[in-house]
Amino acid sequence: MSVETFDYVLMNIQPELEKKVNANRVLSAAEKLFLTLRFLSVGMTFKSLAQSYSLGRSTVAKTIYQTCKAIWKKMVFQHMSPKLMSEDLRKISEEYFSRWQFPNCVGAIDGKHFRIQKPPRSGSQYYNYKKKFSLVLQAVSDADYKFSVIEIGGKGRQSDGGTFHFSKFNELLTNNRFNMPPPKILPGSNILLPHVLVGDEAYPLKTYLMRPFPSTNLDDSRIIFNKRLSRARVTIECAYGIMTNKWRIFLKAIETDTKHAKLIIKVGCLLHNIVREKDGNNDPDFRRYMHSRSTPNQVITSRRNNRATLRAIDIRNQFKDYFANY
């Protein structure tokens, strides 16, 4: 994070942090923000931070929680709108076509496991396929690697598809309450199709969600479609990669209870957006991550056929034919 971006965040949260100052005025707002960013970026424990800065462990924990709450409260509406409007999604779709050559795409969706300590009396609910305890973040990215939608709370034992199925986001999509822009003619054609999300094989094929064709019986047009979809999905893969490489707290188990782990994860997503908007491609962590992605994006194919409506199948086929001919 650049000095300018640090100052920008501080300016937004300073009044909130100074509302409640402890009797000894141990830390200024700037020091609280610095301590929190240190915790997120290095992944130090509360104990090691307390020893490094001659503070009590409880003081460190309370300071980090307070600062994270202030960042979320004061900055989420500026950098991650809780409710995207149709015009917001239309602009995202235009940028998706310009940068990734996938028209009518309003975002790429994927899930990610974040390791946590085992919640008390939780049994195996949070125990994932890697034999770790985790929370699942379901997120949608825009064309510039920023998070446009996040939902945290899936339990580790759930798959990406299962987490999506039970999510509030899926409920919004299913009930037509996500403010999708109206259908639009694909560029250079007379094909009218709805706006869609793109996901991998873990997700169902829906009228609003495209997934790859199965790997069996792939003709040239299906291969082209899968390549286009795979390229469009780069944005969510990179969003997760950039975030976890910058905020290294997410490379290990978060040492808090589940409630505060959710807070830390969503603030990590918000800070990712802030740095992306303010520092852009000049952010050194962004450049390092993108340079490390030397291998081409893997072309994904579906491992199984989820049940899909005839309309969803038809929409995917029309995208396939468009990519093969335009």
Image (tube, grey):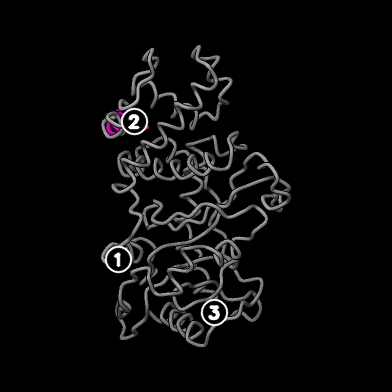
Task: Please tell me how crowded label 2 is: few (under 14), some (14-19), or many (20+) other residues with Cα within 10 Å.
Answer: few
| Residue at the disc numbered 1 | 94
The part of the chain drawn in magenta is 1-8
> Magenta region, mostly helix, strand or loop?
helix
Which comes before the other along the chain, label 2 or label 3?
2
Mark 2 lies on a secondary structure that is: loop
Q: CA distance from mark 2 to mark 3?
A: 46 Å
Q: Residue at x 32, y 62 (%)?
A: 92
Task: Please tell me how crowded label 3 is: few (under 14), some (14-19), or many (20+) other residues with Cα within 10 Å.
Answer: few
Q: Amino acid at mark 3?
A: Asp
Q: Amino acid at mark 2?
A: Ser
Which comes before the other along the chain, label 3 or label 1?
1
Asked whether disc 2 touches disc 3, contact meaning CB atoms under 8 Å apart, the reply is no
| Residue at the disc numbered 2 | 2
| Residue at the disc numbered 3 | 220
Q: CA distance from mark 3 to mark 1?
A: 26 Å
Task: State the quadrant of the C terminus.
Answer: bottom left
Task: Please tell me how crowded label 1 is: few (under 14), some (14-19), or many (20+) other residues with Cα within 10 Å.
Answer: some
Q: Position of residue 315 (x, y in %)?
A: 45, 82
Verify whether residue 3 appears in magenta. Answer: yes
Q: Is residue 254 above or below residue 50?
A: below
Q: Is residue 153 above or below residue 167?
A: above
Q: Amino acid at mark 1?
A: Glu
Q: Which one is nearer the viewer's eye here, 63 or 211?
A: 63
Q: CA distance from mark 1 to mark 2?
A: 29 Å
Which comes before the other along the chain, label 1 or label 2?
2
Specify the label residue 171 is tagged with.
Answer: none
Q: Residue at x 47, y 86 (%)?
A: 311
Q: Residue at x 42, y 40 (%)?
A: 287
Task: State the quadrant of the N terminus.
Answer: top left
Verify whether residue 52 appears in magenta. Answer: no
